[in-house]
Image (spheres, helix red, strand yellow):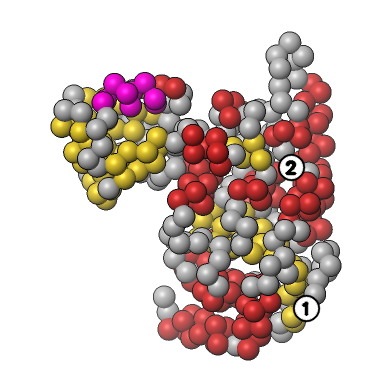
Amino acid sequence: MSTKITSIQNRYEKSAKINQITESIAVPEQKIHLKGLIGSSLSFVTQALFSKTENPMLLILDDKEASAYYLNDLEQLINDQDVLFYPGSYRNPYQLEDTDNANILLRAEVLNRINSRKKPALIVTYPEALFEKVVTKKELDKNTLKVSVGDQISIDFINEVLFEYEFKRVDFITEPGEFSVRGGIIDVFSFSNDYPYRIEFFGNEVESIRSFDVETQLSVEKQKKINIIPNVENKFFAENRESFLEYIHPKTTILIHNTEGLFSKLDKFFEKAGVAFDKLSKEIKHSEPEALYLNQASFIKKALDFSIVELGNKAIFRTKKTFEFH
């Protein structure tokens, strides 16, 4: 990172205003308004607040393009391990076949990080992604296969579990949701990791686990324990879903770039889901829109439990304090 950027970061981190905002958001359920943040000043303020608080953050931007722009900024200012992208998984409600595997992997990675109790992360997202409800923590935990080096576990058992999770057995894996078995080795591409895992057995004991590159087949990193997660958008999970706000840590600070736009988009998407639901075949039972999707009212009801920082020109929540930037 350039000296100039580091110097700007230091100025933000040491500013009295950032200290006041940090103290404000430490109060549970606090609602504040930051005015005048444009361009990368939003990235510097978000980074400074994230570095000064021990808690996770959720940054909600206007759309996917804006999210990608700020994600790139924040990965440069913080790092790409602690800044995560939470995208939408498909284009149209009730068209699960239209899902994007790369986005499902990113969503699962975020859910896995929240579940793993690792260091708090800064999650960047947008309205379409929040509109889709997620598998419940309990359900995901129940359907996560945990494997550690030294475990006594048979290849047949893992084979059975992966079939149950609707993983596809292939000769050579190339994408999430696939696995292959060769002698005492299982290669599996979980929906929560950028690289697949190679699990080597000695009899019924897990001898080693490592992630590897699909293209080169070379090892990337040795692992002591891994979580193998199925497709979190699978119909298999459709019955038990909850809002992403139910999933995140209660101490998460939510930063919203355009609250009015977020509310209006959630209702627009929900209305679209209702129209799609009415057109579905009545011969097959489908979950109602309320079970799968989030509208404005449900978002507000849950959001009130969190500390919220509004970043637009106008605050929609009843804010206690306003901080102006120039």
Find the magenta span and give its range. Answer: 154-162
Residue nearest the observer in this picture, 267 or 230: 230
Measuring from the top left, give residue 77's x and y in whole percent: 49, 71
Q: Is residue 287 above or below residue 125?
A: above
**Overall secondary structure of the magenta stretch?**
helix
Say which label, 2 or 1, has the lower sequence index: 2
Q: Secondary structure at mark 2?
A: loop
Picture quadrant where residue 157 is located: top left
Q: Residue furthest left?
A: 202
Residue matched to label 2: 294
Residue matched to label 1: 322
Q: Residues within 10 Å of mark 1 (few under 14, many from 20)?
A: some
Based on the picture, tell me whether residue 157 belongs to the magenta stretch: yes
Q: Quadrant of the C terminus?
A: bottom right
Residue drawn at 77 percent across, 14 percent down: 282
Q: Is residue 311 visible?
A: no
Q: Secondary structure at mark 1?
A: strand
Measure the C-alpha gap from mark 2 to mark 1: 29 Å
Measuring from the top left, give residue 205's x and y in whole percent: 20, 33
Kind of residue indicated by mark 2: Leu
Measuring from the top left, give residue 323's x and y in whole percent: 74, 80
Q: Residues within 10 Å of mark 2 (few under 14, many from 20)?
A: many
Kind of residue indicated by mark 1: Thr
